[in-house]
Image (tube, rainbow, N blue to C red):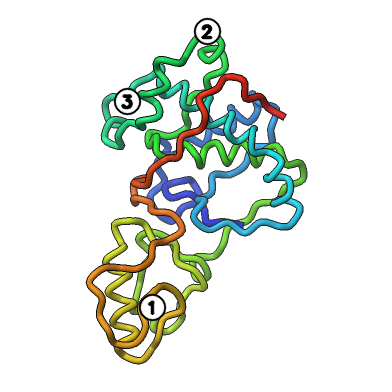
Amino acid sequence: MAREEVHSSRSHHVPDPSFIDEVLLRDLARHEGLVAIPPVNTGVVLFSGRAARSMALLERVFLDYAWRFLCWQALHPASGPVASYGELDAALFARSLVGPTERARALPFPSANRWLLDEAAFWLTLGHIRGLRVADFRRADVAQGGEFDPHQWAVREPVLYHYFSQNTQRIYDWMVDRAALGGGVTQGGCHGSEKRTQPEWRGQEEHHEEGRQGQFVRAQASSSLGGE
């Protein structure tokens, strides 16, 4: 289980086919002989034991998809609206490594936001798990991004909140105020009424509402990584 990807067709945010090209994503899955997995946000994911064990065996497959997407990005420098999201340093590095084999295996990237590289690789990797069932968390249980709502949370808080980086200070201030009012906090480093000038914690992943701001950990630039 996971939350739907922001701006996907299942998102309560305005769906944006340029942000998530689900038609291309399904075409990629069909081309690779995979089950098409609806795009999910990887900030909060709940696996069954079987799915977790299967994913652990697919590490090389995941890295291979990331590399193939990266090769395509290297061959197609960001321009126009895509450039507003920025270019991955890893794509710039990969340009000198892309040869005929990499060109032939490169996969078109299904988003204008190239920071979603790891998520796109994750979606295709999930497609290797036969019989996998995917469901979305309810917003009331797992909130994300701009769904931060302290007024509503005064009545019922979600179990988890995956905050994006532009909400960091708001969340920190809310935690401090909540602790000062005696509400306590359920996670993080803020307790009691002491106000700290800097957060002592970070979310599971830092996302921008329009995409990632965190650093992508580069995969080994090796064309020898194969599929299953």
- Which residue does the numbered mark 3 point to in the structure image? 78
- The amino acid type found where label 2 is placed reads Pro
Of all residues, the one furthest to the left in this rendering is 197
Q: Is residue 51 left or right of residue 64?
A: right
Q: Nearer the viewer, residue 32 or 63?
A: 63
Picture quadrant where residue 167 is located: bottom left
Q: Is residue 31 left or right of residue 228?
A: left
Mark positioned earlier in the residue sequence (1 or 2): 2
Quadrant placement of the N terminus: bottom right
- Which residue does the numbered mark 2 point to in the structure image? 100
Of all residues, the one furthest to the bottom in this rendering is 182
Given this view, does label 1 or label 2 mark the residue nearer the observer?
2
Q: How many badges with numbers are in the image?
A: 3
What secondary structure is found at the residue carrying circle 2? helix
Residue drawn at x 48%, y 49% as measured from the top left: 5
Mark positioned earlier in the residue sequence (1 or 3): 3
